[in-house]
């Protein structure tokens, strides 16, 4: 649960985090600040951003710029890049973290409900990627993208279908540009987190007493949810020069959750030791 990288690993580096005023974006931002980065946080709600920026500066002594930006609006992203360059000189990395999500049987969704999630997650990520990538390429600067996806980006998942479609697209974007833009010295990687408690995710994915009924920790082989610092350590590594040869990768950090749900015999963890004794006696030679 402790920080992992050397102090000052991000000295003179500037990182933009979309959706950086809350939840996991804020936690990853805090650790990057502790490592010496300049931080730019963006989202739709300026008052939330300003409050988080003040809190993060006070906690870490680092510098935080808060810029309101809806990732579905390309000009607003271009403005974030401009403001970042005005304040800190250049952008070194972009963490595509903003998302929208909720649970629902798909047949209950309006087409607008489907659009809203896909537009934030997929369009928001490719707009941000396009604006930042073009800027780096024009200026002949290296750059790093880190995209937050989910483990159902490759398995799919019922009841969060717009999010599953959008995250699958983000994963494909990550892998495609890792190859295409490597010639510009731009790396692209992704992280697929399992459950990490945040107000934003829990209120929308486990509303009411669902959190008690379907305690996510019980599905996870390690029998616990993730700690924000664990995710921050991985994100910082993938945004740092220590991972300079990692490109086009998606790293899962979920305590083994998604593999367990695919394992034909994973449910046998319910079999108690005494029953295994009986089964052992019954088995043929
Ligand atoms: C069905 C819903 C809905 C719900 C909204 N809609 N919520 N439909 N079930 N729970 C529909 C509305 O009826 C409307 O359609 C359309 O979606 C737009 O809704 P608005 O409320 O106008 O949208 P908006 O105010 O822009 O809010 C966007 C949002 C909201 C996505 C709905 O939840 C939000 O702001 N989310 C941002 C943060 C977030 O979601 N964080 C969680 C990320 S967690 P109609 O047809 O009525 O106009 C995550 C974790 C994944 O991704 C993995 C976990 C392990
Ligand atoms: P969160 O706190 O709700 O974060 C989502 C952020 O996205 C918010 O700050 C929100 O701010 C911003 N956002 C939403 N729509 C936006 C838009 N149109 N433009 C700009 N910003 C927008 O939830 P979280 O749990 O930290 O999620 C962070 C990331 O982790 C997401 O990509 C999510 O899919 C991923 N993830 C989370 C978990 C988990 O267990 N928590 C698991 C797997 C993946 P505004 O409302 O102010 O715009």
Image (tube, rainbow, N blue to C red):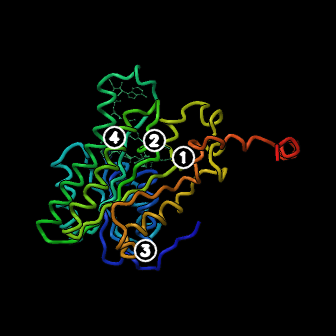
Q: Quadrant of the N terminus?
A: bottom right
User: Rounded to the nearest whole Å, what is the CA distance between mark 2 and mark 3?
Assistant: 35 Å
Residue toward you, 76 or 130: 130
User: Do the numbered discs 3 and 1 sit on residues whose CB atoms are within 8 Å?
Assistant: no
| Residue 50 falls in image quadrant | bottom left
- For residue 258, the mark is 1
Along the polypeptide, which appears first: circle 2 or circle 1? Answer: 2
Of pointers 4 and 3, the one earlier in the residue sequence? 3
Dots 4, 1 in contact, CB < 8 A? no
Dot 4: element: helix
* Callout 2 touching callout 3 (CB < 8 Å): no
Q: CA distance from mark 4 to mark 3?
A: 31 Å
Which label belongs to residue 35? 3
Horizontal and vertical percent position of residue 174: 31, 55
Q: Which residue is mark 2?
A: 155
Q: Is residue 91 above or below residue 36?
A: above
Label 2 vs 3, first from the N-terminus: 3
Of badges 3 and 1, the one in the foreground is: 1
Cβ of mark 2 under 8 A from ligand 1: no
Location of residue 168 in the rendering, given as x and y in whole percent from the top left corner: 36, 44
Residue visible at 47% across and 64% down in the picture: 234
Tag count in the figure?
4
Q: Residue at x 64, y 46 (%)?
A: 217
Which class describes the residues within 10 Å of circle 3: few (<14), some (14-19), or many (20+)? many
Query: Would you place residue 45 above or below residue 36 in this image?
Result: above
């Amino acid at each position: 649960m402790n920080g992992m990288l050397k102090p000052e690993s991000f000295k003179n580096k500037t990182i933009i985090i979309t959706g950086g005023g809350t939840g996991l974006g804020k936690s990853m931002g805090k650790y990057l600040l502790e490592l010496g980065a300049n931080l730019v946080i963006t989202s739709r709600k300026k008052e939330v951003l300003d409050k988080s920026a003040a809190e993060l500066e006070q906690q870490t002594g680092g510098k935080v710029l808060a810029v309101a930006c809806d990732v579905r609006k390309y000009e607003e992203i271009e403005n974030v890049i401009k403001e970042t360059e005005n304040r800190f000189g250049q952008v070194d990395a972009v963490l595509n973290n903003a998302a929208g999500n909720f649970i629902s049987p798909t047949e209950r969704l309006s087409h607008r409900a489907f659009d809203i999630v896909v537009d934030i997650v997929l369009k928001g990520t490719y707009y941000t990627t396009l604006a930042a990538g073009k800027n780096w390429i024009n200026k002949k600067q290296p750059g790093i993208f880190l995209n937050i996806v989910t483990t159902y980006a490759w398995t799919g998942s019922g009841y969060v279908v717009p999010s599953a479609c959008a995250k699958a697209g983000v994963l494909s974007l990550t892998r495609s540009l890792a190859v295409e833009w490597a010639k510009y010295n731009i790396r692209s990687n992704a992280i697929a987190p399992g459950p990490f408690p945040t107000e934003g995710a829990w209120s929308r994915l486990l509303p009411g007493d669902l959190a008690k009924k379907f305690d996510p920790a019980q599905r996870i082989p390690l029998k616990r949810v993730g700690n924000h610092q664990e995710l921050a350590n991985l994100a910082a590594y993938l945004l740092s020069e220590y991972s300079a040869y990692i490109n086009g990768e998606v790293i899962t950090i979920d305590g083994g959750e998604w593999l367990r749900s695919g394992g034909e015999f994973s449910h046998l963890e319910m079999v108690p030791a005494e029953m295994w004794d009986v089964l052992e006696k019954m088995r043929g030679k």
